[in-house]
Structures are given as C-alpha cells and as structure tokens.
Amino acid sequence: MSESRKQILQMLSDGKVTPDEAERLIAALEGASEGATPRRDGTPKYIRVLVEAEEEGAGEELTKVNIRVPILLLRAGVKLAGLIPQEARSHVNQALREQGMTFDINQLKPENLDELIDNLQDLSIDVDKKNRLVKVKVFCE
Amino acid sequence: MMLPLVMDLRVRTDGGHRIRLWLPLFLLWLLALPLLILLLPFYAVACFVMRVNPLSGIRAFWNLLSAVRGTHIEVDNARTFVFMHVY
C-alpha cells in the first residue's frame, strides 16, 4: 500500500475526512499514478487484425481471419522504403495514382507510423455487405 | 535482432487432408548465404548507380527479415484452415 493511500485512510479513521471524500481522494490518487506511468511501458509490439465474416453458402459457419504483424516489421518496411531513389519514388507514386490511390510514398516516414500506432488503440469496423455481416477489428497489443 | 529460424505451417484442405510442416528457415539462410556472397558485386554496382548507401540497404533488409519473427496468420472457415507462425 502506498504512503499516500495510508495517509488518506488515516485521515478517514481520524474523522478528518468523510468516506465519500476519502473515496474521491483515492480515485484522484489512482488517476494521478496512472497518468504518471511512462508511456514507453505500454508500447505495443504487434498489430492484430481480426475479421469475422459470414460466407455465402457456408451456413452458420463464420470465416475467421486472425493476423498478427510485428510493428517492427512495419518500421523496417518504412525504413526500407526510405532507401528507394527519388526517381523510382515518382514512378511508384504515378503507378499508385493510376490505380486510384492518391498516396505519396515520400510522406511515408517512421514518425508518421508512430502517430498511426498511437491512434490505432482499438479500431473496430462493422461492414454489412448484402445482408452478410463482416466484422473487422484492428488493434495494437 | 535475429533472423527467423522456424516456420510452423498447418493446412487443412476441403477433403479433410491435414498437413503440418515445421520449415527450418535457418537452413534456407545457410543455403542462401553463398548465393548472396556471389551477388554482392552486382549489389554494390546497383547501389553505386542508384546512389544508395550499400550498408544502409543491407541493414534495412536484415531488419526487415528479422522483424518477420512473431508473424502469425490464421484463416479458418468451414472448408479450409490455414495457420502460419514464424518463430
């Protein structure tokens, strides 16, 4: 038990604070300690993609897909993409545009990947496709 | 950072056939090593032409291969089942 928590309980037993006040103080203390936890401790290592889909003609059986990709692999891929010469990059961008993807690989940087991972805490998507349910869940772990 | 050593591959086909393979990837790296050494001069020339630091390229490729460890793919439906894990 932490020293601060002991002090709050002592104040409660001394009658200096009411039980409600003590509860609020403990809650505030827990909130503060969670906020003080370094973010690095919770650094995710993998991106997990879970898909559950009703397949046509398969009855009640669901098609399940479970993919776990190491985040290091994404980082290594981004770094490798950074070695692509400038001339080749313009060709890649043009090919992507022709396929209808307006994506600039010059913007593919490790810091952008960090931002994506930070925001990808728990993404869940439900897709209703012609009365067939497809559930997609993407999260970091 | 270590290269992946083994891949566990399991497949169940529509006909009920089950295949389970432990693929020793470390043997693949050992077999590929002489070939990579032979290709090294061509790689150096390509890096020179493309103005890429050859050491950065090797490091990036090594990191990419090493990061494959821990990859897990599982697809399961009424007819087939595919499982792959890289150790």
Image (cartoon, rainbow, N blue to C red):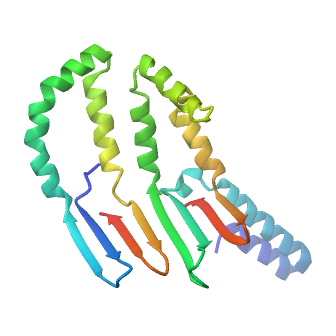
- For the residue pair A91 and A81, the one nearer the viewer reads as A91
Image quarter for residue A102? top right
In the picture, measured across the screen, residue B84 lies left or right of residue A58, that is left
Image quarter for residue A140? bottom right
**Vertical relation: A87 (above or below) A111:** above
**Vertical relation: B44 (above or below) B21:** above
**Number of callouts in the render?**
0
Which residue is pictured at 42% across the width and 76% down the height? B80
Is any part of residue A1 visible from this angle?
yes
Seen from this angle, which residue lies furthest front?
A57
Which residue is pictured at 13% across the width and 24% down the height? B41
Residue A141 spot, x, y in % from top left: 54, 62
Residue A107 spot, x, y in % from top left: 57, 28
Is any part of residue A16 visible from this angle?
no
Say which quadrant the N terminus of chain A sits in: bottom right
**Vertical relation: B1 (above or below) B75:** above
- For the residue pair A8 and B25, the one nearer the viewer reads as B25
In the picture, measured across the screen, residue A86 lies left or right of residue A134, that is left
Which residue is pictured at 84% across the width and 78% down the height? A12
- For the residue pair A31 and A47, the one nearer the viewer reads as A47
Residue B56 spot, x, y in % from top left: 31, 28
- For the residue pair B26 and B45, the one nearer the viewer reads as B45
**Vertical relation: A57 (above or below) A2:** below
In the picture, measured across the screen, residue A61 lies left or right of residue A19, that is left
Which residue is pictured at 35% across the width and 53% down the height? B68
Residue B7 spot, x, y in % from top left: 27, 64
